[in-house]
Amino acid sequence: MDEGLRNELSKQGVFTTTLQELYNWGRRSSVWPLNFGLACCAIEMIAASMARFDIARFGAEVFRPSPRQADLMIVAGTVTKKMAPLVVRLFNQMPEPKYVIAMGACAISGGPFKQGVQRAQGH
């Protein structure tokens, strides 16, 4: 459909789209996090989906069990040197576009363990 016809229909109150545009809108408008917690910080991730904090308002209430179905990885907990390759493997299995959030003191700065996500990966 050419742009002129689309504009004319839009003036009449008829909106047209393609299945691809609708699909991309859905992927852009909701984020599906990976159900993945490493330690006690996973409780913070679970609490974020509860009514008090309500990540559902951002379209992220559907935690996915598979990295191939998720587009947001929430790293919640201590990432040790032994666990770092597995975190990277899960990240690589996620489709594009993909996002990562570090949640909790241990994932962000290492907490009492002094080893955050960046150090565990050897960066």
Image: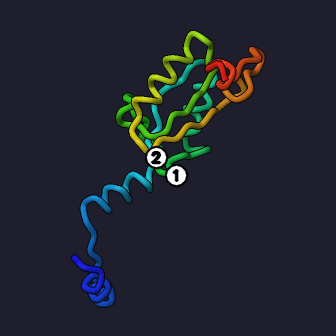
Display coloring: rainbow
Gap between marks 2 and 1 measured at Cα: 7 Å
Q: Is residue 94 left or right of residue 54?
A: left
Give the vertical position of 14 relative to 85 (above or below): below
Please determine whether, in this image, residue 117 is positioned above or below residue 3: above
Q: How many marks?
A: 2
Q: Residues within 10 Å of mark 2 (few under 14, many from 20)?
A: many
Quadrant assignment for the N terminus: bottom left
Residue occupied by mark 1:
58
Residue 31 image point, x, y percent: 46, 46
| Mark 1 secondary-structure assignment | helix
| Residue drawn at (59%, 37%) of the image | 101
Most extreme residue toward the front is 123
Identify which residue is drawn at 61% across, 12% down. 81
Instruction: Classify 122 as above or below 45.
Output: above
Measured as percent of width and height from the top left, residue 113 is found at 74, 14
Q: Residue furthest top?
A: 82
Tags 2 and 1 in contact by the CB under 8 Å rule?
yes
Sequence order check: which comes first, mark 2 or mark 1? Answer: 2
Q: Position of residue 86 (x, y in %)?
A: 49, 18
Q: Mark 2, mark 1: which one is toward the viewer?
A: 2
Q: Which picture quadrant has residue 39?
A: top right
On the image, the x and y values in percent for residue 78 come to: 64, 19
User: What residue sits right under mark 2 in the picture?
Assistant: 31
Identified at 67% across, 25% down, the residue is 118
Is the C terminus in the top left, top right, bottom left or bottom right quadrant? top right
Residue sitting farthest toward the left:
1
For this rendering, which residue is in front, 36 or 123? 123
